[in-house]
Amino acid sequence: MSQSAYAIGHQQPDTDTVISAIALARLKQAQGTDVVAARAGELNPETEFVLDRWGVDSPTLLEDATDEELLLVDHNEYSQTVAGAREATITQVVDHHRIGDVTTGDPISFRAEPVGSTGTILTGLYDEAGVDIDEETAGLLLSGLLSDTVVLRSPTTTDTDREVAERLADIAGVDYEDYGKELLAQKSKLGEKSPREMVLGDFKEYDIGDDVLGIGQIETVEPETVLDQRDAVIEAMDEVVAERGYAVLLVLVTDLLEEESTAFIAGDHTEAVGDALDATFTDREAFLPGVMSRKKQVVPPVEDALK
């Protein structure tokens, strides 16, 4: 086993997963434990903006975690972990998602709370440990919180998230609404991404019995950028289903300003998924008013439909 342990988030890392790895590594280091922040994939434009804004280097890219020691943040399912995680030693989990299938040989610290971001939980862990949160770390934690809660607009947002956001913004010296608007603008930088890159950019797998569900989400203030490429996106989805054998593949195009989503579907079970989401798929597309959260509004009902 290597000398250092790695704090690491899920594949296809978003801002909350990256800053959580950094924040947890900093906390452990302050407590005298050698932990390195790592990532399991490439950074998205929003996360690159955040790291540049706060003058922080990107976490190291860990491509294979075999025989390493891992502290997992923002996930706890093997389908989302870095390659080699099954052959690694997992010593801590900090997460705000459902409890998945990650198992350990020994008891570990496992912190999972129903809040809007892992950054919110980490803020509490700093408090419990008696470790001060400096301006830079506050800026990072605030970024992850605002990103995952869509500037406190997501249905996953709790009163705890709101309180923590105000506190972190005060420490970081920013107005969280103004800063949040900057983050929303970064989310829309789809740039020259190919349809396949759009599908897999913010993507998670869920094991449901013998089936695997894949859900991608494209959060933007300019949904027409994606919707205008509808046929190409669905073609890319079909290719991914053929390659990976998903029972269902959903892609949510989420309009952050209107607080609604358009869903594309590939694979089987279209009618069952439509019923689960209280929507009708016409030509493999459905409108989902008020739907912004994959975790809270899409995964649970679709999972129930596929069981």
Image: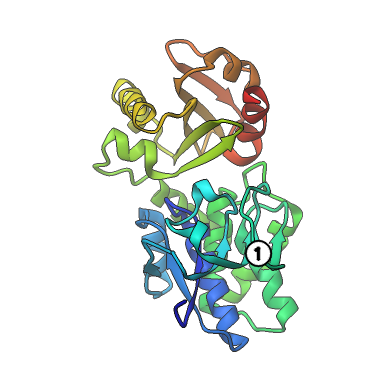
Can residue 190 be seen here? The reply is yes
Locate residue 242 relative to residue 267 in the image: left or right. Answer: left
- Amino acid type at mark 1: Gly
Q: Residue at x 38, y 65 (%)?
A: 62
Res 47 → quadrant: bottom left
Q: Position of residue 258 (x, y in %)?
A: 53, 33
Is the C terminus in the top left, top right, bottom left or bottom right quadrant? top right
Res 110 → quadrant: bottom right
Look at the picture and state if 18 lies above or below 239: below
Q: Residue at x 40, y 68 (%)?
A: 51
Q: Position of residue 7 (x, y in %)?
A: 52, 69
Q: Position of residue 274 (x, y in %)?
A: 58, 17
Locate residue 163 relative to residue 6 in the image: left or right. Answer: right
Report the front residue among 242 and 277.
Answer: 242
Indicate the secondary structure of the residue bearing disc 1. loop
Locate residue 51 relative to residue 126 in the image: left or right. Answer: left
Q: Residue at x 66, y 33 (%)?
A: 300
Q: Residue at x 63, y 86 (%)?
A: 31
Q: Position of residue 91 (x, y in %)?
A: 61, 69
Report how many numbered discs are placed on residues in the image: 1
Report the front residue among 197 and 50.
Answer: 197
Look at the picture and state if 203 lies above or below 165: above
Report the front residue among 106 and 223.
Answer: 106
Q: Which residue is mark 1?
A: 105
Look at the picture and state if 15 lies above or below 174: above
Can residue 175 be seen here? The reply is no
Residue lying farthest to the left in this orientation: 192
For label 1, the crowd category at 10 Å Cα-Cα, with few meaning under 14, some 14 to 19 and many 20 or more, is few
Display colour scheme: rainbow
